[in-house]
Amino acid sequence: MIESGNHLDLSFRIPPSLSFADLQLRWGSDGQVLFEWSAIEQLCEASGVDVDLFKLTDTSNVARLINHWYEIHRGNGGAIDLVKEEAMSYGAHLSWRAETPQSPCPLTQQKSAS
């Protein structure tokens, strides 16, 4: 880990037992992308990074980590994640949360109702 100005440059090691799909990305009833913290915890543990850097800070930090992980995943020939692909189409107008969703994304429901 290297501190550079107001940010940290972190290096991650993705263990063979962990895949991007372990995040279990899904839509929350409020339009947030939900994910499993256990995958982030495993990634941080394997990399020697304190998971609290993501749990106790702004959600944009974990979102950037997930975005970067997806780029690496796809660059290595990993499967397309449909939730991640749709989330990317919303750009910065999207938030992330680690909870179990109650229903599909309301934005998706509105699209299909049209």
Image (tube, helix red, strand yellow):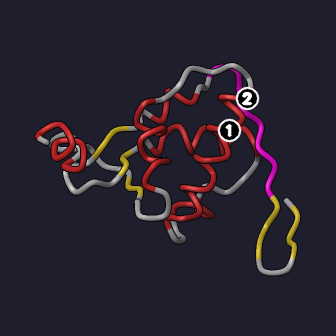
Q: Which mark is residue 71?
A: 1
Q: Quadrant of residue 90?
A: bottom left
Quadrant (top left, top right, bottom left, bottom right) of the N terminus: bottom right
State which quarter of the image contains the C terminus.
Answer: top left
Q: Residues within 10 Å of mark 1 (few under 14, many from 20)?
A: few
Q: Is residue 14 magenta?
A: yes
For this view, does 98 lie left or right of residue 21? left
Label 2 sits on residue: 75
Residue lying farthest to the left in this orientation: 113
- Residue stretch rendered in magenta on the structure: 10-17
Of all residues, the one furthest to the bottom in this rendering is 6
Q: Amino acid at mark 1?
A: Glu
> Measured from the top left, where is residue 24 in percent x and y?
41, 33
Residue 41 location (% of width, % of height): 57, 44
Q: Secondary structure at mark 1?
A: helix
Q: Amino acid at mark 2?
A: Gly
**Which residue is pictured at 85% across the width and 80% down the height?**
5
Of 74 and 17, nearer the camera is 74
Q: Residue at x 82, y 61 (%)?
A: 9
Disc 2: CA contacts within 10 A as few (<14), some (14-19) or many (>=20): few
Label 1 with label 2: CB-CB less than 8 Å:
yes
Q: Residue at x 26, y 48 (%)?
A: 28
Name the secondary structure under disc 2. helix
The secondary structure making up most of the magenta span is: loop
Q: What percent of the width, then of the height, locates residue 61?
A: 59, 63
